[in-house]
Image: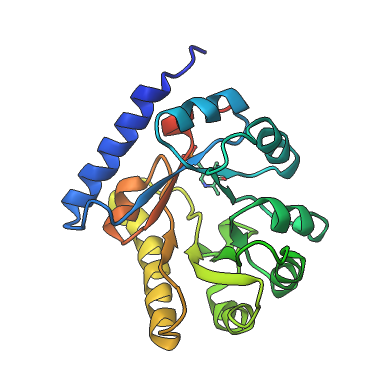
Amino acid sequence: MTEVVLSETLAAAHARLAAALHAAGRDEHAAQLLAVSKTKPARMVRDAYRHGQRDFGENYLQEALDKQAELADLTDIVWHFIGPLQSNKTRAVAEHFDWVHSVDREKIARRLSEQRPEHLPALNVCLQVNISGETSKSGVSPERLDTLVSAVIEMPGLALRGLMAIPAPAATLAEQRAPLARLRQALEALQKRYPRAPLDTLSMGMSDDLEAAIAEGATLVRLGTAIFGARR
Ligand SMILES: *Cc1c(COP(=O)(O)O)cnc(C)c1O
């Protein structure tokens, strides 16, 4: 496979995001790009950084820690953990990331909060919601979301920033939008209930459904393939 030219794919991703925001009648700064660099080498992350990208998403802990060590000179990178998270990995995630998007259980949240080093600001957290039903094993069910929120919002090591979802693939724009709309409505309900919480983040939209996600209010779109090329 020929390697992508990151200056071009990043510019195209920014143009695509800007067009989607414009079409949705939203401010041009209302959503940001999270570059999902899983399976891609550190030198591609460095290249994207050189072209202005700062927020990067990783799914696999050891791979991410290796890249972070290699890129330690880039001190203003913002690292987001977006993959499934087991208990035995929480300490390293609490110590080495700025955000976690995939929190779906109280036990995991509590460990992250307790293990967050005191010299660091609170760990930014999105709760992953299983918005399409059975198709995914990850994510808290919509019925259990309120209970999880009421626990997480009290945890001193965490800043609850919003919600994340990975909807089931859908063929049409309308079918893509339906679950994304449910995630937006869930966040709006939380914002009403907790008006002083920093609940400002809707992490949704990937390479195949960015336009649907922006139409439904996404504030952080997670693009992998569109920026770094296909994964093996
Ligand atoms: C891999 C991944 C992405 C990026 O997906 P693309 O389709 O390559 O853009 C986004 N979010 C999560 C949680 C992922 O695991």
> 157 or 145: which is nearer to us?
157
Q: How many marks?
A: 0
**Residue at image location 57% in from the left, 65% down from the top:** 125
- Pinpoint residue 23: horizontal percent, then vertical percent: 17, 50
* Residue 186 falls in image quadrant: bottom left
Residue 44 found in image quarter: top right
Residue 192 percent across, percent down from the top left: 38, 85
Q: Is residue 148 above or below residue 90?
A: below
Left/right placement of residue 104 relative to residue 27 reads right
Q: Is residue 232 visible?
A: no
Q: Is residue 54 above or below residue 5?
A: below
* Residue at 45% from the left image edge and 73% from the top image edge: 198
- Residue at the far top: name it: 2
Q: Quadrant of the C terminus?
A: top right
Q: Which residue is at 41% across, 39% downward?
A: 207
Near-viewer residue (143 or 65): 65
Tell me if residue 3 comes above or below residue 115 in the rendering: above
Residue 113 versus residue 196 in the image, above or below = above
Dividing the picture into quadrants, the one containing residue 137 is: bottom right
In the picture provided, is 59 more to the left or to the right than 186? right
Image coordinates of residue 117 in percent, x first then y, are 73, 63
User: Can residue 16 be seen by looking at this rendering?
Assistant: yes
Q: Residue furthest bottom?
A: 193
Image x and y of residue 49, in percent: 47, 32
Residue positioned 70% across, 70% down in the render: 113
Task: Report the residue that reaches farthest toward the right.
Answer: 88
Q: How is the image coloured?
A: rainbow
